[in-house]
Amino acid sequence: MKAGSQRLYAAARSMRACDRFGQAMLLQELGGTITPGSTDPGDRFDFDAVRWHVNLLGISASGDDMPGALDAWMRSAQVFHNIDGTRRATDGRPDCPYGGQGTPEDAIRAELLHQATRVAEAT
């Protein structure tokens, strides 16, 4: 499942704030998958078969073990976030869906207040 910039940013930041068990649980809660490497002795020379794979929010990464795969996913998410051009916030956060504006209710309230002020000035 591919996600927007904000959801990816939030997932990566939340994962960094957790311990390893918390990271695995968060990954599962968000619908991600962890595929363990093969333990079959016949696969020991197959590099891809013995690696752990993590897939979450459209980003895949792999590592030699589960912590390595989780770290690789967090690095990949950070790289994706850094090269994503939809951010406008100067501190690197994804752009707000309101573009810095208030909610629609705030705009309506401000317009009503402005109209009431104009009526009061006219009389």
Image (cartoon, rainbow, N blue to C red):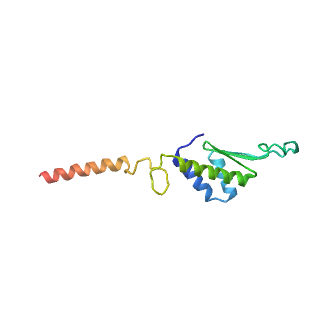
Residue 23 appears left or right of 112: right
Count of marks, rendered view: 0
Q: Which residue lies furthest to the left in this view?
A: 123
Figure check: 21 above or below 55 = below
The answer to which of 24 and 60 lies nearer the viewer is: 60
User: x, y percentage for residue 85?
Assistant: 49, 46
User: x, y percentage for residue 93?
Assistant: 49, 54
User: x, y percentage for residue 27?
Assistant: 65, 49
Residue 88 appears left or right of 113: right
Figure check: 102 above or below 2 = below
Q: Residue furthest right?
A: 41
The answer to which of 97 and 69 lies nearer the viewer is: 69
Which residue is drawn at the image coordinates 38% and 49% (left, top)? 103
Res 16 → quadrant: bottom right
User: x, y percentage for residue 32?
Assistant: 65, 45
The answer to which of 109 and 88 lies nearer the viewer is: 88
Which residue is drawn at the image coordinates 45% and 53% (left, top)? 89
Residue 112 appears left or right of 37: left
Quadrant location, the N terminus: top right
Residue 43 appears left or right of 51: right
Q: Residue furthest top?
A: 1
